[in-house]
Image: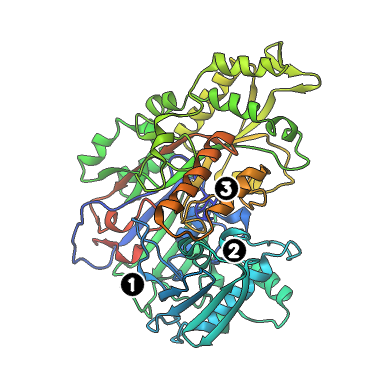
Amino acid sequence: MKLNKSIAVAIAMAAGSSLLVAPSTFAASSSTGGTIEYALPPQTNLTWFLPIVNAANDSVYNTQFVDQLYKPLLWINNDYTINWKSSVASKVTYNKQGTVYHVFLNKKWKWSNGQPVTSKDLMFTWNVVKAASSSKAPAPWPFVGVGTGDIPSGIKSVVANNNYEVTFTLDKPANQQWFIYNGLIQLTPMPAAAMDKYSNINQELKYLGSNATNAMFDKVVDGPFSVQSATSSQSWVLVPNKNYAGHKSTVSKIVFNFEASNTSELAAIKTGAINVGYLDQSEIGSEGSLTSSGDQVTPEYSFGIFWTEMNMWPGAPSKSIFDQLYVRQALQMGLDNAGISKDIYKGYAVPLIGPIPPVPNTQFLDKKLAKNPPYPFNIAKATQLLKSHGWKMVNGVMTKGSQKMQFTMMYVTGSTSSTDTAEVMAQDWAQMGVKVTLKGEPFSNFISATSNPKDTSWQLATGSGWDYNGPGFYPTGGQLFASTAPSGTGFSNATEDQLINATHIPYATQQQTMQHFFAYEDYTAKVLPFLWGQNVATLVVTGPTVHNVLPYLDAATAFPQMQYWTASN
């Protein structure tokens, strides 16, 4: 995820009106040419253009763009199977112990300069990831995926056997699916011949880091598109890569459009300036004017979670308060997620009770937990819980000694629904003596602040979340909830670490595997490393001039295959 990706995701993640879309009815079209005008969420800039990323730039939207330039080692379908047709790898084999993995590369893939994608490129990525994962790596690193999927510290060796086979040997046995979906998936090959400029790895990291924010740096790519132009807070334009070895795009270009607000985005849809976009839930009632002109509106859910973060990083003034489980429990009981889903999101949001969303339905949801939410909305009970631990109401604010339940809460701007949600949360918490001052920030600023352990300007942050879309396709939470999680918020709990680690071990049966997964899921739901919000649907709008969009948007993963989209002239 990421916040989305990315992980990725990721946060990797996104505001409530983010464009997360999935397969629908296939609309065939033989038309060629035309332009796809694709709307980004309100006030969202694209800020990073390499397939390996640091925490401050780990968003779904950066990855959506980058995935059009670089083919991932493993492409995940909407049903969370591997799409070998769209993966650089042709297959992955492994031993029974889960310690040795052979990655075979598909020989069909070529760089845009005509050179083949080989083991040398995968090894280059591995060496960069390994070095960028160090706490001593130069700015703007470290790599966001450090610690996820045994990358890199759990890897004993990586060896290129020939031009198209690389062997990964682990220090200890790992659940094979976990390592493939959370570890190997992070290693998107980069063009070694074009990017490997320095024999000194620190110089190389500085070189890549200094160019990662420049979209025009990506001259040699193996994905379906290349970059034509990029203008911050305006647009980022892709054109088809003529040397792409897979299904070639027939559009003339795809434009990622910056949107100032959901209101301006809706106006652009109505005029046809946007033909792949979204409808904010606050705009429900406007869809008639869209569908009457041929637009299609489709609700879609990602396999992800939305939350409120609590700043528990060392040095944060709020750490000593949020470290107390009863405080987190009280705050969770003060969230009317069902009411927010009904009144703000018009029913197009599903309340969460833990780290796995109820929708879309997957094997990872513990049905017993789903039937018995541990912290239902109850302001009176939440207030009493605080009082039972010595907190007293003083001038409308819960106070204990020198501590006050008085916080600054960031929220993502640009979406009416996200703003309304933050305001309702503040109003409900005020009834229990938790005074919240709201601070709106554009998405990129929000992610930058929440990913910085030294930023103490906020205590609570809402409007983001996580798609289980890499690293982190296998949703065991290590990237988020472990004590060393690079995408966490300073939460640290030894039992949580043990339960996460138990999901990484190979077991004899699927039943044993899921027993350990559910143990992790149930504990995480109750220990509250984050405050659970709701999984918000995106109301996807596709215009009458675009075709084949919905079948290739993949809502569960949030990573569309745009080369299959077509547009009428």
Q: Position of residue 370 (x, y in %)?
A: 41, 34
Q: Is residue 7 left or right of residue 262?
A: right
Task: Decide: is 384 above or below 92.
Answer: above
Instruction: Please tell me whether mark 3 or mark 1 is closer to you in this view.
Output: 3
Mark 3–mark 1 Cα distance, whole angstroms, equals: 35 Å
Q: Position of residue 543 (x, y in %)?
A: 27, 50
Q: Residue drawn 51% across and 80% down?
A: 166
Which residue carries the number 2 mark? 150
| Mark 1 neighbour density, 10 Å: few (under 14) some (14–19) many (20 or more) | few
Looking at marks 1 and 2 on the same chain, the residue that comes earlier in the sequence is marked by: 1
Q: Position of residue 24 (x, y in %)?
A: 25, 51
Q: Residue drawn 45% across and 65% down?
A: 67
Q: Residue drawn 18% across and 61% down?
A: 28
Q: Residue furthest front?
A: 508
Which residue carries the number 1 mark? 85
Looking at marks 3 and 1 on the same chain, the residue that comes earlier in the sequence is marked by: 1
Quadrant in the picture for residue 126? bottom right
Which residue carries the number 3 mark? 499
Q: Amino acid at mark 1?
A: Lys
